Image: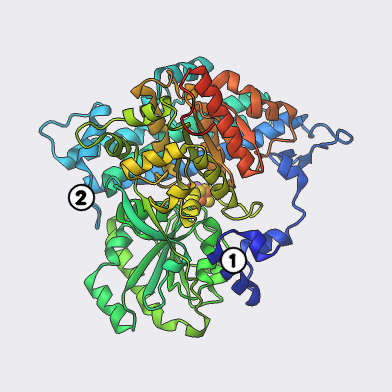
Amino acid sequence: MKCDDRTIDKASRKMLEITEKENISTAWDRFDALQPQCGFGKLGICCRICTMGPCRIDPFGEGPDRGVCGATADIIVARNLIRMIAGGAAAHSDHGRDIAHTLLMTAEGKTKGYEIKDEKKLKTLAKELGIKTDGRKKNEIAKDVAETLFAEFGQQHGELKFVQRAPEPRKKIWRELGIMPRGIDREIVEVMHRTHIGVDNDAKHLIMHGLRTSIGDGWGGSMIATELSDVMFGSPKPVRSMVNLGVLKEDEVNLVVHGHEPTLSDVIVAAAQDKELLKLAKDNGAKGINLAGICCTANEILMRHGIHIAGNFLQQELAIATGAVDLMLVDVQCIMPAIGQVASCYHTKVISTSPKAKFPNVEHIQFSEEEALPIAKKIVKMAVENFKNRNKKRIVIPEETTDMVAGFTAENVSTILGGKYRATYRPLNDAIISGRLRGAAAIVGCNNTKIQHDYGHVEMSKELLKNDVILVTTGCSAIADAKAGLLDSEKALEYCGKGLREICDTVGIPPVLHLGSCVDISRILMVLTNMVKEGGLGEDISDMPIAGAAPEWMSEKAVSIGFYVIASGAFTVLNPSLPVLGSKEVSELVYDKIKDLVGANFVFEADPVKGAQLMIEHMNKKRKELKLRPMMYTK
Ligand code: BF8
């Protein structure tokens, strides 16, 4: 595959020319080398759950139609799919658990380098959770909040606490379908039990439990991660920043953080401003210490500190290939095991830090909350000391950078729209009701070597903006759109329909609102809930002219997200397809019939513009059902 076919991003194209010339293997090269990929795997009909297998079902109906135990394609596909949900929900929820742990230790005075930054949000949460706040110290309240939310992971019966935030009709649906999550971990464990050989052998029954597990992620683990990160590290506010590989600096120490959890990256921000380390950087010939990020940990520190973003998922190896990254710090999730190998071609040090995650050819410095700041300083010092080892002749930093605005939340959107003294979603709902805006859509998710890098996100976004749809975004999708200028309050207006442009101009926001990392899709759930509560757009999320999409998804986390999003009532477009096409029953269920149960379904559409049009059609249908006024400017 040629560089231009691999990505639409100019900076990435330049770096791919370098990696090709230098014979450095990237994800795209490995993808090419793996062709053709296993067709059974793609269709979801390979079962390796027990050692009588692996069993592969013949998709053409000419060979075996069941595995050794008798499992049909429907059972195999459903089991594989909900195991993906369990993987994704576990990743998000374990992230939430780690943040709760950090909050608890901080409240107990056991950490170095943390403080509770948003006391107001802490108190609001405490009240919601029924924890006394009057006359109590911040740390006492925080301890109770952390312990209460910790208990959500291991809860065995009842209903999760944050799930109660969902609109009443939604909760009724979940209760009636028996998919109200009882405990976050409990549902994940039950996926593993049900999918063991010879347990749950009913495809629909399996998928329903997958939905329950995913709700425990979106309205449980992920929501805990978001809420407690705001309490610990501060709630985001709109902030200006820059994105793409051009944020790396030739004359400064470049330290790139990559992964997901803000516990370490946030304290690295403080360590990188340490006077002694800045002096050391100067002594080593650097003008300063430049911090940048990749993937969701980048989004976390962007949202709270305006730190620049070097790139999204498929740019992690390309950042190292600039020859200018002195140290890459990684924690968990979406970190390619190949980065150690790429780094070995350069002077770049890669340091893994999570007790849960080690990588080949990567040095490990274990992170602990008790010693957070000293560890962060040690790592920054390593980056500074590595600056002198650069091979200057091999440094190629693409010049591309784009300005962006990030830092939106479910809370501050209402202040931005309604004003400081009358925070409200009313202007947003009214704009939709009056036909100035068609609706709202969330575009989220990853990059995938099967799809031209960033093309899906950017083209889908542009088509929606043109049709007066306001967008919210997170994760690698947000980074893709940011690189394309769609998060720039001024530049992005040229892509908007007249109605959307009027709103953005008046309020002073970009038409694509960056809500953070992938766990922060929980913020999107709250935006939708707030819109329902504001009134005039129906009684439930599924009544509103809204939609979701993951046009380049690849991870198990994305599967869990997709399921909790449709379980919450949002029609969702996917590319690539879920690995379900080997089962008629599961395909029909997730791509159609599930809407009779939860009011929303998935659609698989490879063309992002057509995907956007499907979302627009869906919004038009909902507008008609709600008897909203015709669109003011666009058809
Ligand atoms: O959690 S969008 S590639 S970085 S999985 Fe990973 Fe996908 Fe990026 Fe963030 Ni989300």
**Residue at position x 80%, y 37% in the image:** 57
Position of residue 225 in the picture relative to residue 104 (left or right): right
Are there few (<14), some (14-19), or many (20+) residues within 10 Å of tag 1?
A: some
Q: Position of residue 13 (x, y in %)?
A: 59, 66
Colouring chosen for the image of the structure: rainbow
**Residue at position x 38%, y 33% in the image:** 527
Precedes in sequence: disc 1 or disc 2? 1
Residue 352 appearing in the image = no
Position of residue 371 in the picture relative to residue 500 (left or right): left
Q: Position of residue 635 (x, y in %)?
A: 54, 31
* Label disc, if present, on residue 109 of the rendered structure: 2
**Residue at position x 44%, y 33% in the image:** 437
* Label disc, if present, on residue 438 of the rendered structure: none
CA separation in Å, label 1 and label 2: 48 Å
Q: Amino acid at mark 1?
A: Arg
Which residue is the site of mark 1?
13
